[in-house]
Amino acid sequence: MRIIFMGTPEFAVPSLKAIAADNKFELVLVVTGSDKPRRSKHAEPEPSPVKQAAISLGLPVYETDDVNTLEFAEIVADERADVIVVAAFRILPHAVFEQAALGAFNLHASLLPAYRGAAPINWSIINGDRQTGVTTFFLQKRVDTGNIILQENMLIDPAENATDLASRLSVLGACVVTDTLHLIASRQVVVSAQDEKLVSKAPKLTRDNTRITWSQPVRNVNDFIRGLATKPTGWTTFNGKIMKIFKASPGAPFLDKAPVSPGTIFVDNGKLYASCSDGWLELLSLQLEGRKPMEAADFLRGFRQDGQHQLFV
């Protein structure tokens, strides 16, 4: 069965490798995003994780940042693919995904119809979910609305962040992708329609919706930080500068302390805490604008005074 694979980030790599390892499938083309410039002007542009994996596997690669051109549709058509597999790539136009003789399907990192959108892993943690999973579904014109082929559940560890969960889901997703391909190859696919009554959204992460709201309960703030770590990262401001918070932990309750304004910093015994609406959150790893990421203990070396201090805002 001739397959075109489309994906860019690390999340898609296990699926690509799993397909390549199955001798029943022929990967005729790998499509990925263009190489990205590095910070140093003298460094070579950085290839996507999918491109790096494809090259190591000896697979042909086509790079594009625009899937809506006639040229791209023609390139896809020329490969005469039976199936197009999409994992963490761009929204494909009908003119492209209709080229697959047996259909095009997407690997989505949620149990659809929950968390349709660009950031399902992040929002599932932010919302305090304890279970998530992956879904394969046939592409339709409306994004993330196609008929479901397979789904697999996974529990979310209360201590893991979005990067950790993405890594685990990518491995689970690779298994579901190959299982889906075998069903398609054997003509045994049985699909189910998504229940529109159960739809929830996972919108793109922006500067506006990644700002930490300290007036939320401790658990909510901690889930918010976990759901955005390690990228793009929840942020706040400290002394007029942006501070990113990579890791936190529900801290000592400080029940003997009088109520304080949310976002108040408290330093106690070499540990850094921030107040939320119902208690204190210990901050473990952070980055102040203009400085490198660091553990809270390192940050406190320049912040020696114990006690209550100004607010995060």
Image (spheres, rainbow, N blue to C red):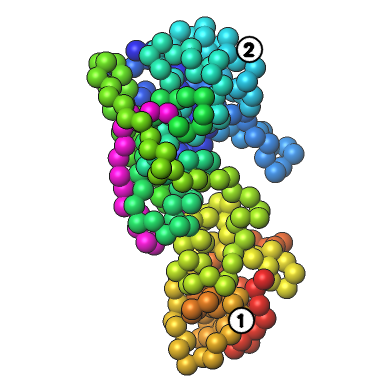
Distance from the alpha carbon under mark 1 to that under mark 2:
58 Å
Expressed as whole percent of the image width and height from the top left, the position of residue 48 reads 55, 33
Residue 207 in view in this figure: yes
Asked whether residue 50 is in view, the answer is no
Picture layout, residue 93 above or below residue 71: below
Outermost residue toward the front in this view:
197
Q: Which residues are magenta?
A: 146-163
Residue 261 numbered tag? 1
Depth check, mark 1 against mark 2: the one in front is 1
Asked if residue 161 lies in the magenta stretch, the reply is: yes
Whether the residues at callouts 1 and 2 have beta carbons within 8 Å, the answer is no
Which of the 4 image quadrants contains residue 71? top right
Could you say whether the residue bearing mark 1 is in a helix, strand or loop?
A: loop
Residue of label 2: 71
Residue depicted at 53% across the width and 75% down the height? 276
Residue type, numbered disc 1:
Ser
